[in-house]
Image (cartoon, rainbow, N blue to C red):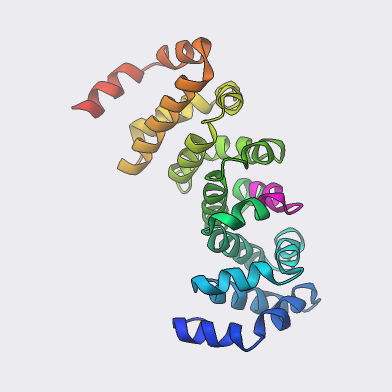
């Protein structure tokens, strides 16, 4: 019933289904766990339900539990999609970042998941990156390295470059990302081969990297093969 319709999702939440569903997140039955999580995902699409889910005591903790220990790949992927949905509300971004295991497991899913899992993970990490206080957890929990590595993956490169642009507003992260072995190379490569939006994100990321990273970073970007030619081509 939660698959379609704002009214359905509203009635289900108002009827007290959220606590009944999230108790099944610890179920040893993989079908029960996956279906309960999928129902919460669908319920969360209705904006008013996002707050009901986040304010339910223990619900976020158990959502992340399924992300870490879910019995099926689909359940874990649906958690990433659920966190993407919930993190659309600014007030919830920091709560999600601070929940133990959330960022680290999203980073793992981005690096090792299926194409769908990677997409859900990168979209969740992108949303979390928009919070100005998320950067230290994103760095310490491995999300920055995962996003830098994702620049090589055409499925998620566009969103990864967008998230890195946001994170590099902090000079520590600009320097850290620039020091990643292939980050600059991959961003320049994205300028060449990416979609129009990916090219835009790659240029914005390099601009932020140079603005915040210092003279050494600027020099490393400027000396990249093809960089000047790509800039001229894009300007034309």
Q: Quadrant of residue 204?
A: top left
Q: Is residue 76 above or below residue 49?
A: above
Q: Is residue 13 above or below residue 104?
A: below
Q: Is residue 151 above or below residue 225?
A: below
Q: Which residue is drawn at 57% across and 69% down?
A: 50
Residue 139 placed where, x, y %?
A: 66, 35
Q: In which quarter of the image is residue 6?
A: bottom left
Residue 74 placed where, x, y %?
A: 62, 67
Q: Which residue is drawn at 40% across and 13% down?
A: 222
The front one of 202 and 127 is 127
- Main structural element of the magenta stretch: helix, strand or loop? helix
The front one of 56 and 18 is 56
Determine if the magenta segment contains residue 100: yes
Q: Which residue is drawn at 61% across and 62% down?
A: 77
Residue 18 placed where, x, y %?
A: 67, 79
**Which contiguous range is marked in magenta?**
97-107
Could you tell me if residue 6 is visible in this image? yes
């Amino acid at each position: 019933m939660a698959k379609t319709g704002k009214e359905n999702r509203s009635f289900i939440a108002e009827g007290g289904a959220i606590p009944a569903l999230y108790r099944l997140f610890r179920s040893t039955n993989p079908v029960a766990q996956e279906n309960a999580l999928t129902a919460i995902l669908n319920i969360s699409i209705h904006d008013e339900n996002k707050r009901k889910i986040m304010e339910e005591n223990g619900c976020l903790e158990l959502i992340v539990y399924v992300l870490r220990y879910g019995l099926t790949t689909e359940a874990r992927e649906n958690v990433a999609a659920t966190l993407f949905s919930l993190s659309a509300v600014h007030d919830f971004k920091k709560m999600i970042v601070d929940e133990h295991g959330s960022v680290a497991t999203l980073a793992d899913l981005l690096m090792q998941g299926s194409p769908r899992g990677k997409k859900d993970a990168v979209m969740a990490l992108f949303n979390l990156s928009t919070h100005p206080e998320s950067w230290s957890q994103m760095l310490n929990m491995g999300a920055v390295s995962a996003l830098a590595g994702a620049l090589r993956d055409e499925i998620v490169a566009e969103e990864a470059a967008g998230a890195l642009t946001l994170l590099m507003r902090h000079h520590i992260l600009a320097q850290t990302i620039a020091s990643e072995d292939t980050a600059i190379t991959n961003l320049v490569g994205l300028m060449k081969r990416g979609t129009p939006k990916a090219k835009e994100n790659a240029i914005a990321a390099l601009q932020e990297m140079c603005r915040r990273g210092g003279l050494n970073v600027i020099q490393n970007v400027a000396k990249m093969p093809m960089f000047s030619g790509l800039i001229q081509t894009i300007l034309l």
